[in-house]
Amino acid sequence: MTRPLLELTDLKVVFDTDEGVLAAVDGVGFSIQRNEVLGLVGESGCGKSVTAMSMLSLIPSPPGRIVSGRALFDGRDLISLSHQELRQIRGRRISMIFQDPMTALSPLHRIGNQLAEVWAIHSSMKNREALERAREWLGKMGIPDPGDAISAYPHELSGGMQQRVMIAMALMLDPELVIADEPTTALDVTTSAQIFELLHEMRRDRTSILLITHDLGVVWETCDRVLVMYAGKLVEEAPVRELFRQPAHPYTRELLRSIPGFDPDRELYAIKGQVPSALNYPAGCRFHDRCPDAFGRCEQEEPPLYVLSGGRRSACFLAEKWVS
Amino acid sequence: MNPEPLLTVRDLKTWYPIRRGVLNRAMGFVRAVDGVSFSLEKGRTLGLVGESGCGKTSLGRSLAGLEVPRSGEVLFRGEPVPPGNRRGKIWHKRIQMIFQDPFSSLNPRMTVMDIVTEGMAEHGMLKGSREQAAREVVSRVGLDPDAVFRYPHEFSGGQRQRISVARAVSLNPELVVCDEAVSALDVSVQAQVIRLLKRLQEELALSYLFISHDLAVVSTLSHEVAVMYLGKIVEYGPTAEVLHKPQHPYTQALLSAVPRPGKEKTHRIVLPGEPPSPARPPSGCRFHPRCPQAMEVCRSVDPDARTRGPVQVWCHLY
């Protein structure tokens, strides 16, 4: 196998709060291959966004602290890079699409200028040419009347159109990796469908996407591989079809069962209990008190991330049983 | 069975004036709800689906008395319900609402006990002590009775939504308008709250108007579904019929846009453009500028309801 585009190892991130030290991400490691769409799923507070933000030094510090971890990108560790060096990579070789385009775009600057700024920072392009390019890109993004859109302010565009602007901004410099954090969560389903269609079309063959989402339907349709996080830990990794066909961790299985289907007669399943607080994780496996398959060992000992066949990993003592 | 349905809505219109100029005169109207009719039986759930701006929330708020409709009729067991501004206390007891955001819909300065018993006190429903009443109500929604002394910020999103549910059911209402009640919650928490709503419906014979943009969620607890587009209902019928055999091109597009885990991707109908502004709805059928099957007649004539088996559909194709 060729060298991965990005390799994250043993990432630990904590937040210092008044109530104590909050372990947001606890020993997460994975790799992103070239030209793949990797999904990172989990529920609110599981650490999925913090994981991605930490790789680009985008977590607010303080209160956030990266305790350990390496993120090797093209032979260099992103986490130990200086701000100066990181700036050469961030935006150009790795870009981000955030959930809420309304807060990610500056309300005080016209769309065209915000797009042109990307070239101004990362190349020596003249302003006029940059604006012309911005107009072209807005057209490519399916924005009607791109000539008008470049002189519009973000609030004059709908949420879907704003997100198209964000995508243009993220893809304009042809990055190797795009980190998309819940890119369509704020949008309607039909708009979301348009955005994913666009993302697929616009993605050059060599661009990888790390898609952070809580929506398993979106994962199913867009991702090649999936990582599942629970309570700050990576609990499962699998190719997307395998994950849905035969989850190798009880949390994944229970989560999949609680997705509402289109079947009014089926009784909806719910996982008992609640996600534990990051201030106070239970001993042993963090899912043990909600897990229907838990046994003695799960309460005392934290399961390692077992490597299974077929590129799968699972942090469950019974992992082999679930996939056999 | 009672011949009168619990709730009948006839040609309801809720318009918001667009005020401009020094005289603050209405220059036009945002036609959020523009002629909606449906009925809801006791103990049943009507799911109301549609995208942002289709008027589903305005419709729910109009029924709960939080907006004043411009015209139309709302009947509760045949008895006319006065509009929100002229509505007596009794109606707030009969019709309750659960809001989307469990963070802004609970007063942060009130304890859970005050939140869930405020309405009961107002309506003279407190028999014993306030604490006793509060304990009963919160345990009914699956919270620890000791939670009554705590404040909303001490709870997670799912638990807060349980508090909202407790507040709504504390008055023994007959109709609960749930406006995106589970949309802000994670899948596993969402499933828990949906199950809670279903259990309460069985125990208390509640009727729900369940408003959501999420078709999958709606399918789990609705007996009937109404699909709204730009202020009007475009398709209305039993849940299984509407979701499995959608007839209106908009319903078809909406359903095909939902990614379903485990299902092979079917042909996706990607609609061009965006919904037009409800201040200037298109002529004829409001969906025609985006409809993949639009015909000449759709541009000029607003379709009326066609009955197709158990389903009503507002479309010229039928």
Image: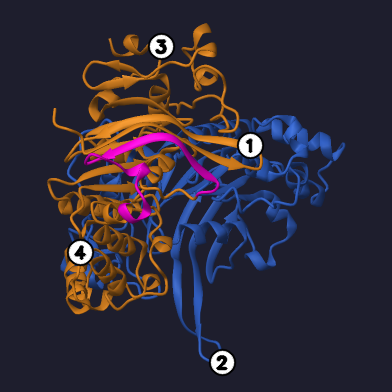
Dot label at residue A317: 3
User: Label 1 sits on what residue type?
Assistant: Gly
Dot label at residue B23: 2
User: How far is the residue under mark 4 from the one under mark 2?
Assistant: 40 Å
Q: Earlier in the sequence, mark 1 or mark 4?
A: 1
Residue A9 pos. (x, y %): 34, 31
Decide if residue B218 is in sight here.
no
Badge nearest the viewer, 4 or 2? 4
Tag 3 secondary structure: loop
Q: Is residue A65 above or below residue B196?
A: below
Instruction: In the displayed orientation, state which residue is furthest to the top.
Output: A296
Q: Contact, CB < 8 Å: mark 1 with mark 3?
A: no
Badge nearest the viewer, 1 or 3? 1
User: Label 2 sits on what residue type?
Assistant: Leu
Residue B184 pos. (x, y %): 50, 46
Are discs 4 and 2 both within one chain? Answer: no
Badge nearest the viewer, 1 or 2? 1
Residue A242 pos. (x, y %): 25, 24
User: Label 4 sits on what residue type?
Assistant: Gly
Is A84 one of the magenta-colored residues?
yes
Q: Earlier in the sequence, mark 1 or mark 3?
A: 1
Dot label at residue A20: 1
Q: What segment carries the magenta color?
A: A61-85
